[in-house]
Image (cartoon, rainbow, N blue to C red):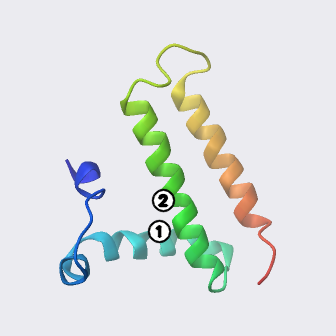
Amino acid sequence: GRYAAARLRLDPETAAASAGGRHAQMTRAILRGYDLAEPDETHAVRLLGSVFHGYVSLELAGGFAHSAPAPQETWTWILDRLDTMLRTWPPA
């Protein structure tokens, strides 16, 4: 239910008290090794969130159930490509 709850629009006060900020901070901690400056770090946080959301939504809906390769193989491929993109991100 946490994933579904993360998709709800919150008023600013509720959002400030929610886990959303902690999730964004966790993503920023993951990105620390890529040495991205603002606003690129925020762009990267949003990019990762969009990829994660899209992939999870499609997989939960069965969008990958009837074709090869296996979803886990594709997920690993995606993570490798994201890593390559972030390591070669042009400086701001």
**Label 1 sits on residue:** 27
Location of residue 89 by image quarter: bottom right
Where is residue 81 shown, x and y percent of the image?
A: 71, 49
Q: For the C terminus, which image quadrant?
A: bottom right
Q: Is residue 28 left or right of residue 69?
A: left
Question: Disc 2, disc 1: CB below 8 Å?
Answer: yes
Where is residue 45 shown, x and y percent of the image?
A: 53, 69
How busy is the neighbourhood of tag 2: few (under 14 within 10 Å), some, or many (20 plus)?
some
Hey, what amino acid is under mark 1? Thr
Location of residue 70 by image quarter: top right
- For the point 60% across and 16% down, which residue is it? 68
Dot 2 or dot 1: first in sequence order is 1
How busy is the neighbourhood of tag 1: few (under 14 within 10 Å), some, or many (20 plus)?
some
- For the point 63% across and 73% down, which residue is it? 33
Q: Is residue 40 left or right of residue 46?
A: right
Q: Secondary structure at mark 1?
A: helix
Which label is found at residue 49? 2
Q: Check the image and report above or below for 64 versus 25.
A: above
Hey, what amino acid is under mark 2? Gly
- For the point 50% across and 75% down, which residue is it? 28
Which label is found at residue 37? none
Disc 2/disc 1 C-alpha distance (Å): 9 Å
Q: Secondary structure at mark 2?
A: helix
In depth, the one of 32 and 61 nearer the eye is 61
Where is residue 87 shown, x and y percent of the image?
A: 75, 65
Q: Is residue 54 left or right of residue 61?
A: right
Q: Closer to the camera: disc 2 or disc 1?
A: 2
